[in-house]
Image (spheres, rainbow, N blue to C red):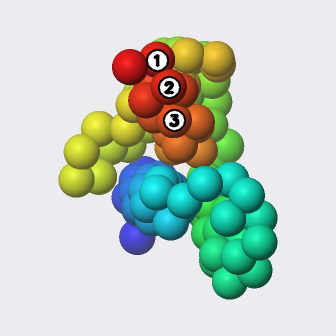
Amino acid sequence: MKPGDRDAANLHDMLEVAREARELVAEIQADAFLHDRVRRRALERMLELIGEAARRITPACLASMASGIGDPPDRAAEPIPRCRCINTRSPCIIISREKNARKRR
C-alpha cells in the first residue's frame, strides 16, 4: 500500500471512530455518562483507536496539512471538515465542533 493510501485509510478510520464516539455519547446526559462505566470504557477505547491511527499518519501528510498547502490524500467516503484552530483537516476535532454547533442552535 502506498503511503498516501495508508494516510487516507488512517484518516478514514479516525473519522469513522469519531462518528461512533459521537453516537455513543449523543443522547446521554453528562451525569449519566459519568456513572456508566461501560460507556466510559467504550469511549476511552475509541479515543485510543483514533490515537493509534493518528500515530500512523506519515510526516509528509502531516506537513501537508499543517502548512495548509494542499490537502491530505482524501479517498474517504466524504470530505473531512476543515479544522478552525490549526487550519488542517483533523477528524479528531469533529466531535467538539459538531457539539458546539448544536449548542448554538
State the separation of the CA atoms marked 3 and 2: 6 Å
Quarter of image, res 42: bottom right
Residue 99: percent from left, percent from top? 51, 35
Instruction: Name the mark nearer the viewer: 1 or 3.
Output: 1
* Label 1: few (<14), some (14–19) or many (≥20) C-alpha neighbours in 10 Å: few
Q: Residue at x 77, y 64 (%)?
A: 34
- Between residue 88 and residue 68, name the one nearer to us: 88
Q: Residue at x 59, y 44 (%)?
A: 92
**Residue 70 can be seen, yes or no:** no
Quadrant (top left, top right, bottom left, bottom right) of the C terminus? top left
Residue 83: percent from left, percent from top? 53, 24
What is the three-letter code of the residue carrying label 2? Lys
What is the three-letter code of the residue carrying label 3? Lys
Residue on which the image places disc 2: 103
- Between residue 29 and residue 87, name the one nearer to us: 29
Residue on which the image places disc 1: 104
Residue 60: percent from left, percent from top? 60, 39
Please report contact status of discs 3 and 2: CB closer than 8 Å, yes or no.
yes
Residue 99 bears which disc, if any? 3
Q: Residue at x 71, y 76 (%)?
A: 36
Q: Secondary structure at mark 1?
A: helix
Most extreme residue toward the left is: 77
